[in-house]
Structures are given as C-alpha cells and as structure tokens.
Image (tube, rainbow, N blue to C red):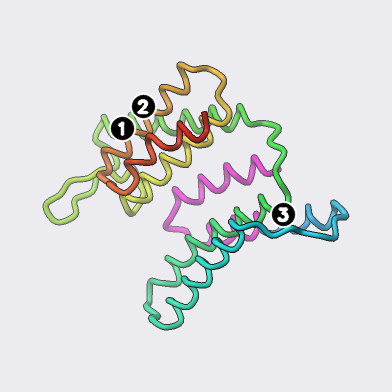
Amino acid sequence: MIDTLILTRIVSDFMWEHKELSVISSALFFSYGCAHFLASGRTRFKLTLSDFFIASFILLLLVTEALNPATHSPLELLKFVTFFAVYVSARIAPPKLGRLQVIAMISLLALAAFSVASITGYGYQTWGRVHTFSGGYFFKTDMALSALILLCLALVGLRSKALSLAAVSMAGYLTLLTNTRIAIPLILAIPLLTG
C-alpha cells in the first residue's frame, strides 16, 4: 500500500496545477500511517530528535504564514505539509516496501523520460532572459527536487550497479540543467548516504 502511495505522490507533484491532488495525497499518507498505527495495537510512540526538528520546522512555517499572510503562501505551505504527512506516515507505520524494485524501476524510467524531454527541447521555460529546464513543473527547483527524490527511490531499490550509475548520471544531469545550485551538493550526498 505505501509503495502505491509513493507513486501517487510522484504523480501529484508533477500535476502541480491540480492542488487538490496534493491535498488528497497528503490525507492518504497521514490516514495510512494513523490506521496502521491503530491496527498494530501499539500504545506508545517514542519521539526522536528528528521528530522535534520536523515539528519545529512546521511550527516555523505556520508562524511565518500567520505573521505574513499572502495569497499564494497557503499553496506553498501545502507543499511542506505534504512532506510532513509522508514523514509522519513513515514514522508511525514504518513501511514494508514489497515492491521496492518496481518503484525503483519506475523512478529510473521517470528520470529517463525527463532526460529525453530535456534533449528534445520539451519542458523549458524562459524566466527573464534565462532559458531553463523545469521538465513540466512550474518551478525549476521542483524539477530538481523531483529528480533527487526519484534518485533516492531508484538507489534504494536497484540492485544493478550499472542502473544505479545511470540513475545518478541522469539525476545529476537534470539537476545541473535546472541550474538549482542548492541541490547540486545532493547529487553527491544521496549516493553516498544510500550506498
């Protein structure tokens, strides 16, 4: 079930124009985690340091939104709340990924599709005088983040070194192509942390 939810998250991220898909995806993740926790019969939940960091970050976002409301900020806040829902779901009900290789292959194919799109000229936007690759996403940073998430999913499930190298190469190429400098160090860090 969690592997299917991960795939729906990838789709809802790409279809960013339909914010309701993001809301539905977040609700499904959160509901899955809570239902799994209740079904497990556990009565205790041990908080970790990362839980406090995540809670502090969400609190900071909420306070910032309350102090500086803007018309688009609730939608931006929704992006981060989605990640929070995924985090809570995984913490409450650690996933048993039965189809990890399938998710890895789908992630690898998505990286390949984005790479082909970039080579054929699809998915570029002009911001001022800069022509940059966003791969169908509204922001180039969303494309870079998607490439890095797909890389994580691919590296965790792929058993072939050649396919893993292909995933790193494509994600690196896409991240560099988006010119999202903040994501560039992650191209090196993710393979080191997952390998």
- Checking the image for residue 92, the label placed there is 3
Q: Which residue is drawn at 47% across and 58% down?
A: 18
Where's residue 108, x and y in %? Answer: 47, 29
**Mark 1: amino acid:** Tyr
Where's residue 7, x and y in %? Answer: 57, 42
- 3D distance between C-alphas at marks 2 and 1: 6 Å
The residue pinned by badge 1 equals 173
Where's residue 164, x and y in %? Answer: 47, 23
Where's residue 132, x and y in %? Answer: 22, 45
Provide the secondary structure element on which disc 3 rests: helix
- Checking the image for residue 169, the label placed there is 2
**Mark 3: amino acid:** Ile
Q: What kind of secondary structure does the magenta stretch mostly adopt?
A: helix
Q: Which of marks 3 and 2 is nearer the N terminus?
A: 3
Residues under numbered marks 2 and 1 in contact, where contact means CB atoms less than 8 Å apart: yes
Q: Residue at x 69, y 60 (%)?
A: 47
- 3D distance between C-alphas at marks 1 and 3: 35 Å
Looking at the rendering, the stretch of residues picked out in magenta corresponds to 1-29
Answer with left or right where residue 59 lies relative to residue 40: left
Mark 3 is surrounded, within 10 Å at the Cα level, by few (under 14), some (14 to 19) or many (20 or more) other residues, namely: some
- 3D distance between C-alphas at marks 3 and 2: 34 Å
The residue lying furthest to the right in this view is 41
**Mark 2: amino acid:** Ser
Q: Is residue 59 above or below residue 190?
A: below
Provide the secondary structure element on which disc 1 rests: helix
Query: Observer-nearest residue: 32 or 126?
Result: 32
Q: Is residue 60 above or below residue 154?
A: below
